[in-house]
Amino acid sequence: MVERIYHVGLTVSDLDRSIAFYRDILGLEFQGEIFMAGEETDRLFRMKDTKARVAYLNGSKAIEAPPIELIQFVDNKVKKVKGNLFTTSISEVCFYTDDIERVYNSLIENHVECLSEPQYFDFRANELGESRAFYFRDPDGIVLEMMQPI
């Protein structure tokens, strides 16, 4: 039934700030923004008079790499909750890099909250190889992961 992941959607409190973070700090390419409103939007989100600004960013031209969809609801209250790896939900969005130290240092220089330094993992016994990874937060506290396969 499912062929691939089309996008990963994140609800944010300030779309312009989030676009700047994902574009300028993480280096994703801004692909465009749409505005959603009307009966179809109300039915989709199951909320009357729903308006949403929606932006798309991607770090890859490969079709297998889904874009990040950032959604800011306009004129609707959004409950802002700091992401938690130990709460049932999407736990994190993981990004690939080929230089995890450079990315980590850049995030620290940009005052991004990193939950640890890059950690080494050896999953060769499970045929998953070796990697380095760390978690960090976006401006809304959403947990993200950076990983470098070795």
Image (tube, rainbow, N blue to C red):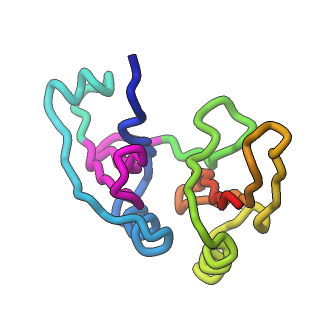
Extreme residue in the bottom direction: 109
Res. 37 image quadrant:
top left
Taking the spot 59% from the left edge, 68% from the top edge, the residue there is: 98
Using residue 39 as the reference point, say whether residue 79 is left or right of it: right
Relative to 86, does residue 137 appear above or below in the rendering?
A: below
Q: Is residue 55 magenta?
A: yes
Give the number of callouts.
Answer: 0
Taking the spot 49% from the left edge, 73% from the top edge, the residue there is: 25
Q: Quadrant of the C terminus?
A: bottom right
123 and 90: which one is in front? 123
Q: Is residue 4 magenta?
A: no
Using residue 18 as the reference point, say whether residue 29 is left or right of it: left
51 and 60: which one is in front? 60
Relative to 11, does residue 59 appear above or below in the rendering?
A: below
Region of the chain picked out in magenta, as a range = 52-78
Residue 32 coordinates in the image, percent (x, y): 23, 57
Res. 126 image quadrant:
top right
Taking the spot 50% from the left edge, 41% from the top edge, the residue there is: 79
Using residue 74 as the reference point, say whether residue 124 is left or right of it: right
